[in-house]
Image (cartoon, rainbow, N blue to C red):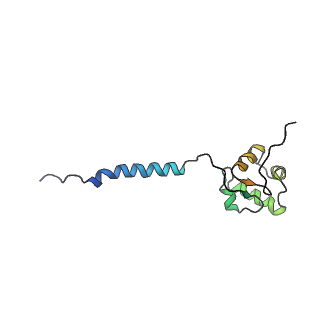
Amino acid sequence: MPPPAPSRTWRRRPLALALATAVALLASARLPAAPAAPLDVNTATQAQLEQLRGIGVAMSERLLSERARQPFSGWSDLVERVPGIGARGAARLSQQGLRVDGQPYEAPAPR
């Protein structure tokens, strides 16, 4: 007796699996972040800060520790008090929506 012929469903499953895998890979890919809704560093939670690219657990803890001592008065205050955030890092975080007292980062004028 010959084996049964494969069903249409059986032939489609590899394609469906390949599509599902491709969608999952694309969804998890680190694409350039679009500007997010503004997030103020003086009111953000640790989880909100860690959603920004470039801020992990250690950086969020440094930010929160310094903020607990005294809220940040501006970007220059933040850059000065938090090790690891320089002008380039501040510009990247600002592009992602991070604000200090509602203000985006503006690079200092060249001397």
Q: Residue furthest right?
A: 111
- Picture coordinates of residue 18 (x, y %)? 40, 48
Q: Quadrant of the C terminus?
A: top right
The residue sitting at 69% across, 53% down in the picture is: 55
The residue sitting at 75% across, 63% down in the picture is: 43
Q: How many marks?
A: 0
- Picture coordinates of residue 33 (x, y %)? 63, 49
Q: Residue furthest top?
A: 111
Going by the image, does 28 lie left or right of 110? Answer: left
The residue sitting at 55% across, 48% down in the picture is: 29
In-front residue for pair 93/61: 93
Q: Is residue 44 above or below residue 97?
A: below
In-front residue for pair 71/98: 98
- Picture coordinates of residue 44 (x, y %)? 73, 61
The residue sitting at 78% across, 44% down in the picture is: 87
